[in-house]
Amino acid sequence: MAWVGASKAPAGCVFCDASTTTDDRAHIVLSRGAHAFVLLNAYPYASAHLMVALTRHVGAVTDARVEELADAMTLVQRAVAAIDAEYRPQGYNIGINQGAVAGAGIAEHLHIHVVPRWAGDANFMTSVGETRVLPETIDRTWERLRSRLHA
């Protein structure tokens, strides 16, 4: 409740802020590549739900450079390996929601969602109570995955 009560709508672009921060913990950044970086989703659908965002502020896959997309996918591979080792999910949803009508919460900055999945992980709370239940805090998830991703 402390986290929910303290939340405010961010000004500017959360991905741009996270890409330039020196405080990775505060911005829940897990790892950085040459053209992209990994960060936890502050509003996760499941435990260890993270995103890989391009460092450059670009909103469409057609506007991204090949090297940016390659770096992002390399980070997706590393993130999946880290989640596999730490959480042992049974599957993943990995994808890009490009544009607000496609479900992008932050349509102006291209990012890839990596959502670990387990059999039965979506229960009645999501559909009836419009609430997600997670077994650990984001801080704990950050600690677990940061140790595996931060080189």
Image: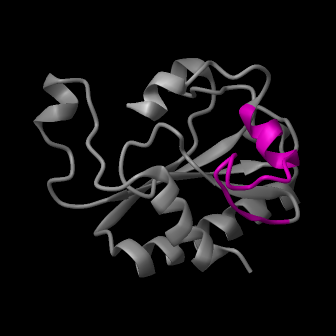
Residue 20 seen in the figure: yes
Provide the residue span drawn in magenta: 14-33
* Left or right of 28 on screen, residue 17: right
In the image, residue 89 lies at what x, y percent? 32, 69
In the image, residue 65 lies at what x, y percent? 88, 50
Q: Name the residue located 83 percent from the left edge and 35 percent from the top edge.
A: 58
* Left or right of 122 on screen, residue 5: right
Give above or below for 133 relative to 50.
above
Give above or below for 92 relative to 98.
below
* Left or right of 91 on screen, residue 27: right
Q: Name the residue located 41 percent from the left edge and 52 percent from the top edge.
A: 137
Q: Name the residue located 52 percent from the left edge and 76 percent from the top edge.
A: 82
Residue 62 seen in the figure: no
> What is the tally of numbered marks visible in this picture?
0
In the image, residue 126 lies at what x, y percent? 22, 32
Residue 29 falls in image quadrant = bottom right
* Left or right of 5 on screen, residue 99: right
- Give the quarter of the figure containing the C terminus: bottom right
In the image, residue 70 lies at what x, y percent? 77, 64
- Give the quarter of the figure containing the N terminus: top left
Residue 21 part of the magenta segment? yes
Front-lying residue, 93 or 47: 47
Front-lying residue, 38 or 42: 42
Protein image colouring: one colour
In the displayed image of the protein, which residue is found farthest to the front? 2
Residue 25 part of the magenta segment? yes
Q: Name the residue located 57 percent from the left edge and 28 percent from the top edge.
A: 104
